[in-house]
Image (cartoon, grey):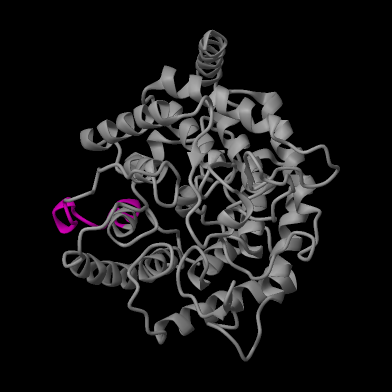
Amino acid sequence: MCRSRATACRSEKILDDARGSASDTGSPGPQVSRSTALLRSPGRCGSAAPWAPILEGELGERAARAVDEIARALADFPCEDLSLGGGRAGEVIFRHYRGESAEARLRLDELLALAQALPPRPPSLYGEGLGIAWVAAHLGLGDMEDLPEAGLFALPSDFDLINGVVGAGVHALERLPLPEARECLERCVDALEESADGAAWRTTPRDGSWQRAKAPGDYFDLGVAHGLAGVVAFLGEAVAADVRRSAAARLLVRSVEWLLVRRLPVAGPCFPAIVGVGVAPEPSRLAWCYGDLGIAAALLQASRRMGETRREREAVEIALRAAAASPVEGKVCDASLCHGAAGIAHVLNRMFHASGDERLLRAAREWFDRTLRFRRADAGIAGFSAWGPDGRHDEPGLLIGVSGIGLALLAAATDVEPAWDRVLLLSGM
């Protein structure tokens, strides 16, 4: 798909400047915030193909039935969690994209009222306060005075997407062109530049975490959810929004080069989840949150923003090698967006629509079929349960629950573009 001449020329200049600096150092469709969508359009020419369903026949019918059953099951599911990642805010997004705009507005109003009583907490994109604020901004349904003021544009101490600076930046992107949002984005880029250890960001493992079991000390996380790939995708969005463009582009080029050097010399999936002193090098699981597929999506998005065609092709090949793994080989244990089959399928679907590569289309269909095969008639919410180290759980939310699964299935079975996946840093391809 082509780009406009002006956009391509501007991207090439950004890339040249950055390299020089680096060497020195079911309805008519839901409505989302129009100004935000325009400001962060992918930069392709007007002839780009619109979003289209990829599931048809028996597979499409299975997907549609699953979406309907998820909607019915969520209506009766008790949930006190208000968060975007695990709770009711994720369901608001699902209802809206299913065409239930009035119901989504009603549920969002309830969440906004409840959010007023939330105790002060560090801002987290997938948490309650900031997560609800992102939903309100994305749907264009919440007034600023309805939201808790404290922390709306504050920066967390961590750097990542889920709990850190990148997540705060994703929320600010959704609120452009507000001056407060642009100022927050500038602070995000500045904070990332100041906290970088060269071209990456260190993480201290938390006690009891799986990272602590693998890393004796600080490590570098390569994933989208908690690591470098998430930073790469966000910096591409900062460049596209013309926020600290030179600094963001310079840091982006360095980070991509640092990331690609960490590939392991193996034939299949090749990126570790984490690297560091004393960490045994091994390929990560297959998922959006960690591993080759999420990294490929971040690389494609950033390459599109910077006008680097060679990197775009490289990202597609990385994704295809990863997608060839079986669920057992990829350690895929459920259907969730975060680390399950629906997330894998949706990333492949998004990359297919961005690249037009038919191999990605075939892989996406296969992984949607696998998503639906995780359903069990006598278990979970609408047959879906989430895997965890301590067993399986019924989860309603966006990241590991049925709201996210339903959104991925809707994107595959309808012509409504899934702009909601901006929260996953996937919409900039």
Residue 287 percent location from the top left of the image: 64, 55
Residue 148 percent location from the top left of the image: 18, 56
Instruction: Report the residue at 48% width, 69% height from top.
Output: 403
Can residue 56 be seen here? The reply is no
Label tally: 0
Q: Quadrant of the N terminus?
A: top right
Instruction: Report the residue at 63% width, 33% height from top.
Output: 259
Residue 75 percent location from the top left of the image: 40, 83
Q: Which residue is more in the foreground, 120 or 224?
A: 120
Queried whether the magenta region covers residue 142, the answer comes back as: yes
Residue 195 percent location from the top left of the image: 41, 31
Q: Which residue is more in the foreground, 250 or 271?
A: 271
Q: Quick check: 249 above or below 219?
A: above
On the picture, is 423 further left or further right than 130? right
Q: Quick check: 308 above or below 401?
A: above
The residue positioned farthest toward the bottom in the image shown = 378
Q: Quick check: 394 above or below 182?
A: below
Which stretch appears magenta? 136-149
The answer to which image quadrant residue 316 occupies is top right
Q: Which residue is more in the foreground, 65 or 94?
A: 94
The answer to which image quadrant residue 141 occupies is bottom left
On the picture, is 148 further left or further right than 26? left
The residue positioned farthest toward the left in the image shown = 145
The residue positioned farthest toward the right in the image shown = 267
Queried whether the magenta region covers residue 135, the answer comes back as: no
Can residue 287 be seen here? The reply is yes
